[in-house]
Amino acid sequence: MSRTIRIDGEVIEPLQNATAVEVEPGVYSVLSAGRSWEVRVTADEITIDGHRFRFEVEDPRQWKRSGAGAGAQGRTAILAPMPGKIVRILVAVGDEVAAGQGIVVVEAMKMQNEMKAAKAGRVTAIEVKENDSVTAGAVLAVIE
């Protein structure tokens, strides 16, 4: 699963070989490269050794109404976010779909991810079938 983590707007790469242990609810002891930090986490803020940061996690699988696709016109392709296997196709060619409606379920790394329509429209193509293997970026379906 690919996620982007931003703290104060800056993209943060994951620590290499880090371990985190929750010592009490919302409080973690993090060890990496011989250093340790006390980390306190709330819904949108993290405190590391007394320094407070606002953070957000962007998940490419999560549909956002405010995204550019929500009001987009024309043809929109639903793409595989990562290599995986098609588990289920939820619509058929010709179906009318709503923005945010599930289109195809892709299994990757033992997790099922529902790919959703970025806009309302009609399904004009389904480029895969159940049990197909797909690569990242493969076109799964098209909505017009």
Image (spheres, helix red, strand yellow):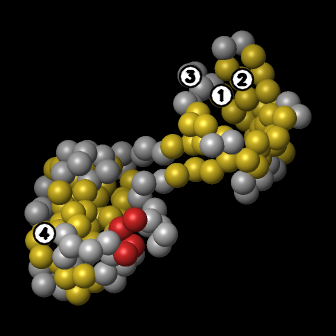
Q: Is mark 3 on a helix, strand or loop?
A: loop
x%, y% of residue 109?
36, 45
Earlier-in-chain disc, 2 versus 1: 1
Question: Mark 1 to mark 3: distance in Å?
Answer: 9 Å
Quarter where residue 75 is shown: bottom left
Extreme top residue here? Answer: 34
Q: Quadrant of the N terminus?
A: top left
* Secondary structure category for the residue under label 2: strand
Viewer-nearest of labels 3 and 4?
Answer: 4
2 and 1 marks in contact (CB < 8 Å): yes
Of callouts 4 and 2, the N-terminal one: 2
Q: Which amino acid does label 3 sit on?
A: Gln
Q: Residue at x 41, y 58 (%)?
A: 61
Q: Which numbered disc, 4 or 2, marks the residue closer to the eye?
A: 4
Q: Which amino acid does label 1 sit on?
A: Thr
**Residue 132 left/right relative to 10:** left
The Cα–Cα distance between marks 4 and 2, rounded to whole angstroms, is 46 Å
Residue 2, horizontal then vertical, whole percent? 43, 44
Disc 4, SS: strand
Q: Where is residue 12 in the image (x, y as percent from the top left)?
A: 58, 34
The answer for how far apart the CA atoms under marks 1 and 4 are is 42 Å
Observer-nearest residue: 75 or 112? 75
- Compute the Cα span from label 2 to label 3: 10 Å
Which residue position holds label 4? 126
**How far is mark 3 from mark 4, CA to CA?**
39 Å
Q: Are marks 2 and 3 in contact (CB under 8 Å)?
A: no
